[in-house]
Image (cartoon, rainbow, N blue to C red):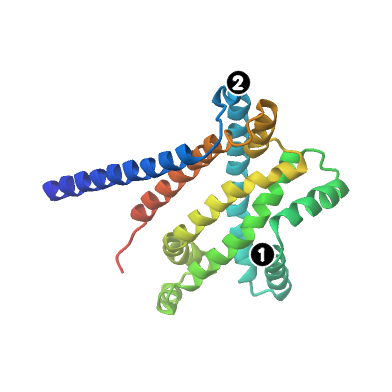
Amino acid sequence: MSRDHSSTLRSRVLWAAVVLVAVSAVLYAMFVSVDYRWNWAGVWKYRTQFALGWLTTLGLSVAAMLVSVLLGFLLMLGARSRLEPVKLLSSGMIEIVRGSPLLVQLLIGYYIIAEALHVRYPMVAGVALLGCFHAAYLAEIFRGAVESIGASQLEAARAVGFNRSQTYRYVIIPQALRRALPGTTGQLVSLLKDSSLLSVIGIEELVQKVKVMNAASYAPLEGYLPLAVAYLILTLPLARLARKLEGRFAYET
């Protein structure tokens, strides 16, 4: 088994190197063909601002992820509640949030709702609004995972005397967690990228820093290549972590 695993690993590394070289060659050919004078020196002077923007995006995204996962789970429970008012309120919030653009929600949420609630900190409002937006999508992902659990398992839980909370804790959630991981990971990656819209409410995150940097250095394109790399540094480890968690929570069917 160890030899087979080693051989598979070497094959994957080899193919990854071949793909990397091929993609690099294509990109190099495209850059060479473009009639544009690159000004990397001008952008390099603003590397500190770029790093601050990257850290701001990272902090905002992590905080919004925590809000979205927690609120999404609560909305899922509310949508499945036996209390009709709670069910209607949760389902209505999910449909309203999913049915309107994030940009509109940010503008209304910050300039109207946050102003009415006297929330003077754009970062707090941005994290809350971004987290609420993606919580609605996560709630549907969680609901689909929970409803995919077979009725026979729920009946078995009732047969051994589990109440509703114990059934969720010991039977439903452990199985639904694995089934929800791929969709949850994709939604969190989207959250990372959607954080770029927070600039409309005055937050100087990574994209806004790049725009300012490009304008100050008279380099309209140079900042966007490091920008793409900076987002990949955030999204690729998240996808890798999700795959590890899927393996960890795997179970026999």
Proximity of marks 2 and 1: CB atoms separated by less than 8 Å? no
Nearest the viewer among 109 and 52 is 52
Q: Amino acid at mark 1?
A: Arg
Q: Is label 2 or label 1 in front?
A: 2
Q: Position of residue 166 (x, y in %)?
A: 49, 64
Q: Residues within 10 Å of mark 1 (few under 14, many from 20)?
A: some
Residue 148: mark in rendering: none
Q: Position of residue 17 (x, y in %)?
A: 28, 42
Q: Secondary structure at mark 2?
A: loop
Q: Nearer the viewer, residue 248 or 52?
A: 52
| Residue 209 seen in the current view | yes
Q: Is residue 19 above or below residue 177?
A: above
Which residue occupies 69% across, 67% down? 99
Q: Decide if residue 37 is on the left or right side of residue 2.
A: right
Residue for point 26% across, 47% down: 15
Question: With respect to residue 201, does 215 lie above or below?
Answer: above
Q: Write down the residue under mark 1.
A: 98
The answer to which of 57 and 69 lies nearer the viewer is 57
Identified at 71% across, 42% down, the residue is: 199
| Circle 2: residue type | Lys
**Label 2 neighbour load within 10 Å: few <14, some 14-19, many 20+:** few
Would you say residue 163 is visible in this rendering?
Answer: no
Query: Quarter holding the C terminus?
Result: bottom left
Rendering quarter of residue 45: top right
Callout 1 secondary element: helix
- Residue 68: give x, y in percent of width and height: 61, 53
Q: Earlier in the sequence, mark 2 or mark 1?
A: 2
Measured as percent of width and height from the top left, residue 7 is found at 15, 47
Q: What numbered label is drawn on residue 45?
A: 2
Tell whether 252 sits left or right of 195. Answer: left
